[in-house]
């Protein structure tokens, strides 16, 4: 047998060639630099989100105050419009009394039809010891009638009666011409007589038709849905005229009759002197309730319109809307923040996967290179005639066989991993005998177990229920667990395999135990990730690609099961494969 020499690449302590290790470190450094850049960008975005949230909070206060002010202005404008239109209806009724009614009475012509606002019309005469009254009928004429009890106390003074609701308008006559003092002007003086019109208002029409219609027209549909409207009397202890009792956000008095409506100017007679004539009216005005100084119809009005937000005050409602808007904004910002966090986590995970894949490529390249180099070297020696003797030939043949098998296993494992993740692993589900699968996996590792002097303790009960699945995929999972134990638990030289049927979990549990060095706590969480290799495996330069245990997990999940591990450093590990039965 001749002596042969072969140039081999220089390796680092991890078993990876130095040139490839340097390339791997350079690529990893670029990945980490990119990840740090991404972190800086995400931190900047997070700070900007915080600034936006602060500005939004400050701005929301101003917006809420502006919204409240704008809403109050809208309500004020609408309330003013309501008051104007209501007063116009009252003025029209007074105009009917002063014009149409007085003309019909003075000329004897038929009275036109009443406006809807009037429920009755009377002509009251207080000149005698007992007041007399004439009532206007549908025929358009005035005829004597019995005086209502409430009208006996009425004086022919301009006023609004509230019990019942009526307008009293005196009839002004007795016009005389006088010389204006200190000038050439002439003055017409009028005096109030003992006659007056009493116009009884239709309260049902006012409350049931006029007020709801005016509210709808002046405030609009949205305000009618958002607000409660009430009308109360100002002079009768807040008696409710219309709507529910409310705590008002806005008040507006109304139902006032202007003097120009209550006190019509008499017709201007021709001037006998040919000089300019000015007309001055002297009048008295009061209310039926004898309010002393400023009767409501000369002030703001006898009724009060009250407006209240549904369920809460106007500021409270807008504060609630502001809080809701802030919560929506905060939720959106939290989602953006969560997206940033997920982006960081995803980027970190992608960096880890990229590094693991690079390590996998480096490791698998090295693992493939070793058996290929060995096969090449051994076969070259045989071809060159450097091997002589039957023993040496047999030894070389065995070495070539071992390296070929090692190469085949690595290729097969890689193809199995790719097959499972392309959903090719569980197409055919059939009843699987778990005991037979375990026996097949052990038989495939029989020579290696004997060579490494492992003692195998097998506990499989009889009549173990079958599982539905792929027998070959389950064999691959158990085979990888055995390979993992052989590779990393050589110090213990013992492997325990136990199968059991868990009635509680409705599953078959397959436990593969060893008495090796165990797995460190920091590695246990990620041990089943693809391409991940534990610190001990990297430090000792143990052969492997980091996909064996990931392949086991994928096989278990393909059957709807799981893989778990319990490990105590220095005492060994137990892997439990759970397959639903």
Image (cartoon, rainbow, N blue to C red):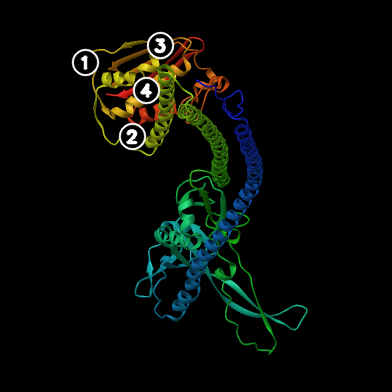
Picture quarter with the C terminus: top left
Disc 4 to disc 2, C-alpha distance: 15 Å
Q: Residue furthest right?
A: 182
Mark 3 nearby-residue class (10 Å; few <14, some 14–19, many ≥20) = some
**Residue 505 visible:** no
Tell me the residue that label 4 is attached to. 479
* Secondary element type, mark 3: loop
Residue 435 drawn at (x, y percent): 27, 18
Residue 463's label in the rendered image is 1
Residue 541 drawn at (x, y percent): 55, 22
* Secondary element type, mark 1: loop
Disc 1 to disc 2, C-alpha distance: 26 Å
Q: Nearer the viewer, mark 4 or mark 3?
A: 3
> Up-down: is 267 above or below 9?
below
Mark 4 nearby-residue class (10 Å; few <14, some 14–19, many ≥20) = many
Marks 4/3 in contact by CB < 8 Å: the verdict is no
477 or 308: nearer the viewer: 477
Q: Nearer the viewer, mark 1 or mark 4?
A: 4
Residue 454's label in the rendered image is 3
Q: Residue furthest left?
A: 463
Disc 3 to disc 2, C-alpha distance: 30 Å
Reading the chain from its start, which is encountered first: label 1 or label 2? 2
> Position of 412 compared to 545: left or right?
left
Q: Nearer the viewer, mark 3 or mark 1?
A: 3
Label count reads 4
Residue 532 drawn at (x, y percent): 51, 28
Marks 3/2 in contact by CB < 8 Å: the verdict is no
Tell me the residue that label 2 is attached to. 425
Reading the chain from its start, which is encountered first: label 3 or label 1? 3
Marks 1/2 in contact by CB < 8 Å: the verdict is no
Residue 358 drawn at (x, y percent): 55, 35
Q: Nearer the viewer, mark 3 or mark 2?
A: 3
């Amino acid at each position: 047998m001749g002596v042969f020499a072969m140039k081999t690449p220089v390796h680092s302590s991890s078993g990876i060639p130095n040139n490839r290790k340097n390339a791997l470190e350079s690529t990893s450094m670029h990945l980490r630099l990119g990840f740090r850049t991404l972190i800086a960008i995400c931190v900047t975005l997070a700070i900007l989100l915080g600034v936006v949230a602060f500005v939004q909070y400050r701005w929301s206060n101003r917006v809420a105050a502006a919204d409240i002010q704008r809403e109050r202005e809208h309500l004020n404008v609408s309330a003013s419009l309501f008051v104007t239109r209501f007063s116009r209806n009252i003025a029209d009724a007074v105009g009917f009394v002063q014009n149409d009614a007085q003309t019909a009475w003075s000329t004897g012509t038929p009275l036109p039809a009443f406006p809807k606002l009037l429920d009755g019309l009377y002509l009251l005469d207080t000149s005698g010891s007992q007041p007399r009254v004439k009532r206007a009928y549908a025929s358009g004429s005035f005829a004597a009638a019995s005086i209502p009890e409430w009208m006996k106390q009425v004086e022919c003074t301009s006023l609004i009666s509230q019990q019942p609701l009526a307008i009293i308008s005196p009839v002004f006559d007795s016009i005389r011409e006088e010389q204006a003092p200190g000038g050439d002007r002439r003055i017409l003086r009028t005096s109030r007589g003992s006659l007056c019109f009493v116009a009884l208002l239709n309260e049902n029409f006012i409350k049931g038709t006029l007020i709801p219609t005016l509210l709808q027209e002046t405030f609009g549909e949205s305000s009618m849905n958002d607000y409660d409207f009430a009308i109360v009397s100002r002079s009768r202890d807040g008696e409710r005229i219309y709507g529910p009792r409310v705590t008002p956000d806005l008040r507006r008095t109304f139902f006032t009759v202007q003097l120009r409506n209550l006190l019509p100017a008499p017709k201007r007679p021709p001037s006998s002197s040919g000089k300019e004539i000015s007309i001055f009216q002297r009048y008295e005005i009061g209310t039926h309730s004898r309010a002393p100084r400023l009767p409501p119809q000369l002030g703001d009005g006898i009724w009060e319109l009250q407006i209240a937000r549904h369920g809460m005050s106007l500021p409270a409602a807008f504060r609630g809307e502001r809080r809701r808007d802030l919560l929506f904004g905060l939720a959106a910002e939290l989602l953006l923040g969560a997206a940033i966090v997920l982006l960081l986590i995803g980027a970190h995970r992608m960096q880890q996967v990229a590094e693991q894949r690079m390590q996998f490529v480096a490791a698998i390249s090295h693992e493939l290179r070793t058996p290929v180099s060995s096969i090449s070297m051994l076969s070259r020696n045989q071809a060159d005639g450097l091997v002589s003797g039957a023993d040496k030939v047999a030894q070389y043949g065995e070495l070539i066989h071992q390296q070929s098998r090692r190469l085949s296993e690595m290729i097969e494992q890689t193809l199995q991993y790719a097959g499972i993740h392309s959903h090719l692993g569980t197409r055919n589900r059939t009843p699987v005998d778990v005991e037979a699968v375990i026996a097949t996996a052990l038989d495939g590792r029989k020579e290696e177990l004997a060579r490494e002097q492992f003692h195998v303790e097998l506990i499989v009960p009889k009549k173990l229920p079958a599982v539905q699945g792929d027998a070959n995929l389950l064999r691959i999972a158990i085979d990888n667990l055995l390979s993992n134990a052989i590779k990393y638990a050589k110090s213990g030289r013992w492997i325990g395999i136990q199968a059991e049927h868990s009635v509680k979990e409705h599953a078959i549990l397959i436990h593969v135990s060893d008495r090796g060095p165990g797995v460190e706590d920091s590695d246990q969480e990620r041990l089943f990730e693809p391409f991940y290799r534990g610190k001990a495996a990297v430090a000792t330069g143990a052969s492997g690609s980091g996909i064996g245990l990931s392949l086991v997990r994928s096989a278990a999940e393909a059957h709807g099961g799981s893989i778990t591990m319990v490990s105590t450093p220095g005492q060994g590990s137990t892997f439990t494969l759970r397959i639903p039965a």
